[in-house]
């Protein structure tokens, strides 16, 4: 099967290797010329860790050639890169293709839905709740995979195409996905900002000193409590919208297979099991610059529509915006940025089922 991957970062390279190694014809495009040139020169990519070896992939400077004839078109990038990749793909995708956002953040599938609506087509859009791979890019053509998650959630726009899309993903990845009723459920069960933002703020000196610290080891009981407070507010929004409730503790047990009743038990178990990854080693890290504007801002925007008070989340947005001297609300996934401004509570639920 031809599969197009747009992006050349951590998630993109991990997917490219896994799928190519499984026998699929992988075509990769990046907006950054040097990333494409490096892969063309190497003739493929190398993977280390729980997956290892070398895989041949086709990298191209022509996004149209990359996408043409692909059964799956994957947007594999951090949230801040989604819109640019979607706008690049938009003129070239066809109605019979499946567009996979790996992973989605803050209902960014709505951006893709609006782009293809302008062309009068409705391809299947798949949202994945998080990356299937815990991975780090080690060089232009090398990626290190620490773990493949046991299960991640997915949903589609329109929602009634979910069963078919689930079958397609199972065919190429194996039985690793759980189908949810709509894409709102996927974005609301994004746990990354819950366990990224508090630990980095509480360990910011380690990041600035470029210490070799393991994220899970930096989550002490006090930091665990901080994480739980943020997650409780997210869960209040989940309950209001009626989507599947997955507390952060349950997420780690399901996705990583670690034992523990509380976060105080789970994070040490994560450290023992994964032996990594190394925590952020810079101030301007995506744990803040991605997870605040594209996730916490999104959670808070939904909370306002749903009438849910979120003082901890709001404080984190305010504090990080001041600390980083950026307006994360203006940058982020507000309802206006997603084209949902003025929609009622019921209207947002309908859009999360049908799309534009």
Image (spheres, rainbow, N blue to C red):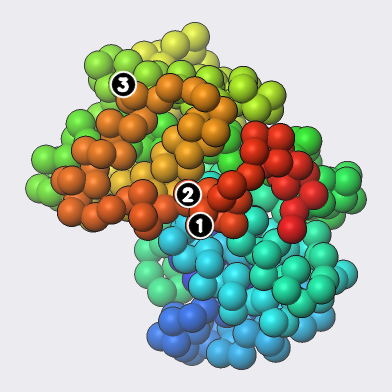
Residue 246: image x %, image y %?
60, 23
Element class at badge 1: loop
- Residue placed under numbered mark 3 in the picture: 226
Front residue of 287/269: it is 287
Pointer 1 and pointer 3: residues touching (CB < 8 Å)? no
Distance Cα–Cα, label 1 vs label 3: 29 Å
- Residue placed under numbered mark 2 in the picture: 334
Q: Quarter of the image for the N terminus: give it.
A: bottom right
Element class at badge 3: helix
Q: Quarter of the image for the C terminus: give it.
A: bottom right
Q: Residue 35: name its quadrant.
A: bottom left
Pointer 2 and pointer 1: residues touching (CB < 8 Å)? yes
Pointer 3 and pointer 2: residues touching (CB < 8 Å)? no
Q: Nearer the viewer, mark 3 or mark 2?
A: 2
Residue 241 in view in this figure: yes
Q: Nearer the viewer, mark 1 or mark 3?
A: 1
Image point 53% across, 64% down: which residue?
Answer: 82
Image point 18% across, 46% down: which residue?
Answer: 322
Residue 194: image x %, image y %?
41, 32
Residue 8: image x %, image y %?
50, 71
Distance Cα–Cα, label 3 vs label 2: 24 Å
Image point 51% across, 54% down: which residue?
Answer: 336
**Mark 1 Cα shell of 10 Å, populated few (<14), some (14-19), many (≥20):** some
Residue 244 lies, with reference to residue 95, above or below; the image says above
Residue 308 lies, with reference to residue 161, above or below; the image says above
Front residue of 236/257: it is 236
- Residue placed under numbered mark 1 in the picture: 337
Residue 143 in view in this figure: no
Front residue of 23/89: it is 89
């Amino acid at each position: 099967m031809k599969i197009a991957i747009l992006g050349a970062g951590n998630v993109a390279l991990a997917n490219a290797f896994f799928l190519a190694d499984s026998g699929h014809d992988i075509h990769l495009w990046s907006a950054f010329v040097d990333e494409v040139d490096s892969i063309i020169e190497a003739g493929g990519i190398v993977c280390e860790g729980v997956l290892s070896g070398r895989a041949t992939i086709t990298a191209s400077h022509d996004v149209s050639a990359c996408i043409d004839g692909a059964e799956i078109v994957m947007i594999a990038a951090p949230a801040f890169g989604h819109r640019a990749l979607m706008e690049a793909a938009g003129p070239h995708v066809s109605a019979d293709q499946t567009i996979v956002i790996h992973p989605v953040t803050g209902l960014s599938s709505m951006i893709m839905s609006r782009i293809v609506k302008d062309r009068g087509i409705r391809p299947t859009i798949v949202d994945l709740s998080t990356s299937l791979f815990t991975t780090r890019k080690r060089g232009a053509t090398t990626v290190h995979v620490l773990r493949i998650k046991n299960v991640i959630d997915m949903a589609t726009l329109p929602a009634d195409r979910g069963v078919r899309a689930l079958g397609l993903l199972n065919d190429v990845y194996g039985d690793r996905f759980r189908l949810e009723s709509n894409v709102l459920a996927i974005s609301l069960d994004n746990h990354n900002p819950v366990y990224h933002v508090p630990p980095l703020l509480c360990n910011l000196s380690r990041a600035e000193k470029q210490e070799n610290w393991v994220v899970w080891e930096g989550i002490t009981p006090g930091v665990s409590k901080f994480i739980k407070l943020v997650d409780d507010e997210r869960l209040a929004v989940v309950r209001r919208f009626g989507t599947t409730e997955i507390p952060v503790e349950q997420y780690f047990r399901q996705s990583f297979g670690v034992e523990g009743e509380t976060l105080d038990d789970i994070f040490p178990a994560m450290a023992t099991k994964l032996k990594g990854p190394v925590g952020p080693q810079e101030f301007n890290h995506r744990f803040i610059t991605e997870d605040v504007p594209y996730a916490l801002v999104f959670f808070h925007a939904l909370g306002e529509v749903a009438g849910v008070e979120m003082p901890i989340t709001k404080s984190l947005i305010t504090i990080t915006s001041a600390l980083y001297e950026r307006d994360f609300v203006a940058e982020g996934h507000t309802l206006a940025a997603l084209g949902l401004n003025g929609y009622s509570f019921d209207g947002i639920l309908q859009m999360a089922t049908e799309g534009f």
